[in-house]
């Protein structure tokens, strides 16, 4: 985690210095999306046996329409054999951007997708709790049966039926039955 954090911090400082946080963030997001949608390209960029010049050529084609800073940054990662850590670097970079912009990432997990009204109500409630702007990332997980699980940073609020059942199970294990 230390090395990806250093790379993320370096890119973030560059973005701040050039006053291009939004543009670089958007380009970085696009790069990550492209790599996620094309696993073969990601493997090629990460595979140590592939020639660095070939990797850079692929990187140029992949990032031709992105910010120059991201194009150069990817080449630095290739030179330093760090492309396999790109996802972690990206996540850390986004955390730095959120902190700079006083935004909080809230991960919301529900058993079924939320509609716009439900999402808005949850966002408003979480904004009150976090004292700032909230960015919500939603996922669905049928295993929680019902309710909601919210993660804000390292805090987890489990209001799911599965969580309540697990809690009840633990309480029952601790309880001794006497006759």
Image: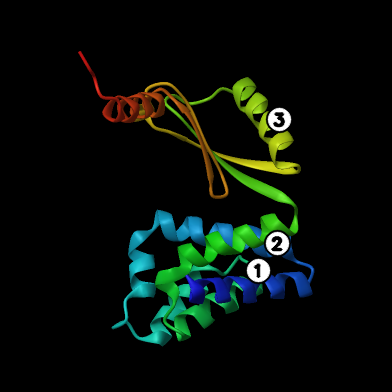
Q: Which mark is residue 109?
A: none
Q: Position of residue 89 (x, y in %)?
A: 52, 67
> Distance from label 3 to label 2 (Cα)?
27 Å
Find numbered disc 1 in the image and state the secondary structure of the residue it sits on: loop
**Structural crowding at the residue carrying mark 3, measured as other residues with C-alpha within 10 Å and reported as few (<14), some (14–19) or many (≥20):** few
What is the quadrant of residue 140 in the picture?
top left
CB-based contact (under 8 Å), mark 1 and mark 3? no
**Looking at the image, which is closer to me, 98 or 178?**
178
Q: Which mark is residue 124?
A: 3
Find numbered disc 3 in the image and state the secondary structure of the residue it sits on: helix
Q: Residue at x 47, y 68 (%)?
A: 86
Sequence-first disc among 1 and 3: 1
Q: Residue at x 61, y 66 (%)?
A: 66
**Looking at the image, which is closer to me, 62 or 120?**
120
CB-based contact (under 8 Å), mark 2 and mark 1? yes
**Structural crowding at the residue carrying mark 1, measured as other residues with C-alpha within 10 Å and reported as few (<14), some (14–19) or many (≥20):** some
> Distance from label 2 to label 1 (Cα)?
7 Å
> Distance from label 1 to label 3 (Cα)?
34 Å
Q: Looking at the image, is mark 3 or mark 2 nearer the viewer?
A: 3
Q: Residue at x 50, y 60 (%)?
A: 32
Its colouring scheme is: rainbow
What is the quadrant of residue 27 in the picture?
bottom right
Residue 125 vs 10, above or below: the answer is above
Is 84 on the left or on the right of 134, as rendered? left
Q: Residue at x 75, y 42 (%)?
A: 131
Read off the residue under disc 1.
Answer: 67
Q: Residue furthest left?
A: 179
Quarter of the figure with the C terminus? top left
Read off the residue under disc 2.
Answer: 23
Q: Position of residue 152 (x, y in %)?
A: 58, 44
- How many marks do you count on the picture? 3
């Amino acid at each position: 985690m230390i090395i990806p954090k250093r790379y993320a911090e370096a890119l973030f400082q560059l973005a701040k210095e050039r006053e291009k946080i939004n543009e670089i963030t958007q380009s970085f997001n696009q790069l990550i999306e492209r790599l996620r949608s094309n696993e073969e390209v990601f493997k090629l960029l990460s595979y140590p046996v592939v020639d660095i010049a070939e990797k850079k050529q692929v990187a140029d084609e992949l990032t031709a329409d992105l910010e120059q800073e991201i194009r150069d940054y990817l080449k630095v990662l290739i030179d330093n054999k760090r492309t396999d850590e790109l996802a972690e670097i990206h996540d850390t970079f986004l955390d730095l951007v959120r902190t700079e912009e006083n935004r909080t990432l809230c991960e919301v997990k529900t058993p079924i997708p939320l509609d716009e009204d439900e999402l808005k109500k949850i966002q408003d409630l979480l904004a009150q709790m976090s004292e700032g702007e909230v960015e919500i990332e939603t996922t669905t997980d049928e295993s929680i049966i019902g309710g909601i699980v919210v993660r804000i940073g390292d805090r987890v609020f489990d209001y799911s039926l599965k969580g309540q059942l697990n809690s009840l199970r633990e309480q029952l294990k601790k309880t001794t039955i006497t006759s």
